Image (spheres, rainbow, N blue to C red):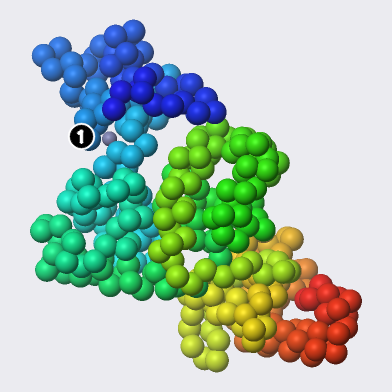
Amino acid sequence: MKFSELTNTYGAFDNFVTVREAKEIGLIPARYVDADFPEDGIFPDKCVCGSENIITRDLKRAACCNPRCKVKLGFALSELFSRFGTKGIGDQTCIKMINGVYSRLRYKSHIEVLALRYEDYPQSLYGTVAGQTMFHTCSRIRTQQMTFSGMISMLGLPELSTSTGVMFRGINNASQLIERIKECGGVASFCSRRGIYDSEKLFWLYNSLTDILLAEKIFSNLRKEGIRRIKICITGMVCVDGVHLTRTAFLNYCNSIARYDNGVQILEIENTSAKESCAYVVADYPSNSSKYLAGKARGVLITADDFVNKIKGVITQCMESEKKGYTAETVAMMNSF
Ligand SMILES: [Zn+2]
């Protein structure tokens, strides 16, 4: 793919030129260019996928111009696995996977790998430990429960790993997302209403809609966002009922009990590093961490077990009051958290 073929939506690549051009106009100093092989060297003209490489005018960032580049997909897949806390599947294994199946990927998306049957794995991975690990990991993460925006933040999509909470707040599925974008008149105004103006984020949201749609079909356990958002700051190790949990596992557990029996999610427990504004600082042990000290000073320290009990208490009270039809009281109870 040539850089000129890339639809530069939102001006995301205004600051880029091709590496070849950068050499021609002297942006890349001649001493970095091998006189015998000007196309290669430290700054090769082309990516291994065959597309043109591009570079910012300040030479700080270089990339392949193809948004669906094999190498990029390999790294995205690797990022996805690491976000799900998987060990033992590195960049090289992921690149091997993408190289092996690229021609069969209908949408040229790394998300498609999550749904591959084991018999469709490439020869280079089929029957290997790495291949088996990847297959089992894919089965495991497909059923993990999460919200729509939580899912997007885990996919390893460029520019969409942070601030997805803000970008997709209140949106529970892909059709709602598409609807909202249409209502706003496009991705740019959808984002600007949410305070997001970064042209690269806009570009990648637009270009990742296919991946998001695919992911929604593959992840079978998406849940709605809770009605009331509770931000907590976790510091140190946390244990529930004497069992040590990772932060992600603790949050998942909290959210799994923060709902009614009929599945309606009441509270949305989120982790934050904003220790001065969070509702609680969850800590099982005293420490000198800045989070612990801030929690202590603000009087919002709570142990993991107490926090879990608090959720259970509020949910039970809400359920009882709702059964009696006390809607206003239910809302007040939720807000009292
Ligand atoms: Zn490439």
Tell me which corner region of the image, top left, top right, bottom left or bottom right, holds residue 325: bottom right
- Name the residue beneath numbered marker 1: 48
**For the point 20% across and 67% down, which residue is it?**
118
Locate the C terminus and report the quarter of the image it occupies.
Answer: bottom right
Residue 145: x, y in percent?
Answer: 50, 72
The answer to whether 218 appears left or right of 138 in the picture is right
Is residue 12 toward the left or the right of residue 36 in the image? right
**How many numbered marks does the figure carry?**
1
Secondary-structure class at tag 1: loop
The part of the image, by quadrant, that contains residue 294 is bottom right
- In the displayed structure, 109 sits above or below 326; it is above
Residue 250 image position (x, y, % from top left): 54, 77
Question: Which residue is more in the foreground, 105 or 285?
Answer: 105
- Is residue 54 toward the left or the right of residue 273 in the image? left
- The furthest residue to the top: 25
Q: Residue at x 25, y 54 (%)?
A: 94
What residue is at 36 percent from the left and 55 percent from the top?
Answer: 111
Please name the amino acid that badge 1 sits on: Val
Instruction: From the top left corner, tell me how far across and down residue 293 is, in percent.
Output: 68, 68
In the image, residue 326 sits, relative to residue 280, either above or below, namely below
Q: Quadrant of ligand 1?
A: top left
Say whether residue 317 is visible. no
Q: In this view, does 13 lie to the left or right of 19?
A: right
Disc 1: CA contacts within 10 A as few (<14), some (14-19) or many (>=20)? few
In which quadrant will I find the N terminus?
Answer: top left
- Seen from the viewer's position, the closer of residues 296 and 180 is 180
Report x, y in % for residue 282: 64, 75
Q: Residue at x 43, y 27 (%)?
A: 7
Query: Taking the image as drawn, is residue 10 in sight?
Result: yes
Is the shortest distance between ligand 1 and the CB of mark 1 under 8 Å? yes
